Amino acid sequence: MSIHPHTLKPSTAHQNRSAIVVSVKAACAGSAATLAVLLGGGCSFHAPAVELASSSVGQTTPSGSVIDVQLSIISKSDQPIPLRNIEYTVEVDGMGEAGKFSGVRAAESTLRGGGTHALVVPAAFASGAPIPAGTPYRISGDLYYLEPGQIAAILYDYHLLRPSVSFSGSGTIGQSPATPATPDARATPDAPKK
């Protein structure tokens, strides 16, 4: 018995495989469109700004002092912004290497759209004597936040994208800042600090 190729009908397995390929292609096209929207196509998201608000001498002991630096985090977006961590360095003039403190603090808050949030970051110094009010200092650092959207959250959780805004400013302890913090918004892959 001979079978002619033109008389063969596609098998059910072949039909199912074709249907799966079409479904996968449609899903990929839909996912790409969704990804474009989630990553900013049509969104009005803006990075927050960080400004130096004030500073004061906190706890003082015979072995050192804590300086509390208050930052104002300002939303330029109409959407809530989950704040993650803040990495910062405070340097106090006239103390040499003992006058430098670097820290990481969890921001533990969500900045409401169009709102302002006060965040106090402590800096501890083993100065052997209290640091007097009026002493000049500088602060610089990076505030890490989460952009809106499920894709952004997944990328953040897997350390693939860490949006941040850099800031710096200077002032004197216990007085208004001489130089307000200057923001520099950027989105960076998570990489070790140098």
Image (spheres, grey):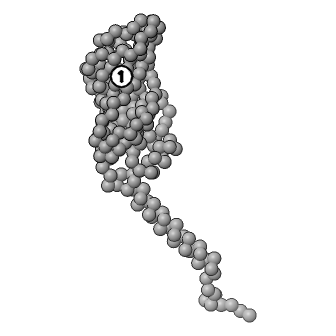
Residue corresponding to mark 1:
69
- Where is residue 106 shown, x and y percent of the image? 45, 32
Disc 1 crowd, CA 10 A, few/some/many (<14, 14-19, 20+): many
Q: Secondary structure at mark 1?
A: strand
Residue placed most toward the observer, 106 or 35: 106
Residue located farthest toward the right when viewing the structure as drawn: 1
Q: Quadrant of the N terminus?
A: bottom right
- Where is residue 117 shown, x and y percent of the image? 33, 34
Q: Is residue 140 above or below residue 164?
A: above
Residue at coordinates 55% horizontally, 74% vertically from top-left? Answer: 19
- Where is residue 27 shown, x and y percent of the image? 48, 65
Report the amino acid beneath label 1. Answer: Val
Residue at coordinates 42% horizontally, 11% vertically from top-left? Answer: 60
Residue located farthest toward the bottom when viewing the structure as drawn: 1
- Where is residue 193 shown, x and y percent of the image? 48, 30
Residue placed most toward the observer, 153 or 68: 68
Q: Is residue 23 left or right of residue 138?
A: right
Q: Is residue 139 above or below residue 25?
A: above
Residue 168 can be seen, yes or no: no
Residue placed most toward the observer, 71 or 87: 71
Q: Is residue 47 left or right of residue 158?
A: left
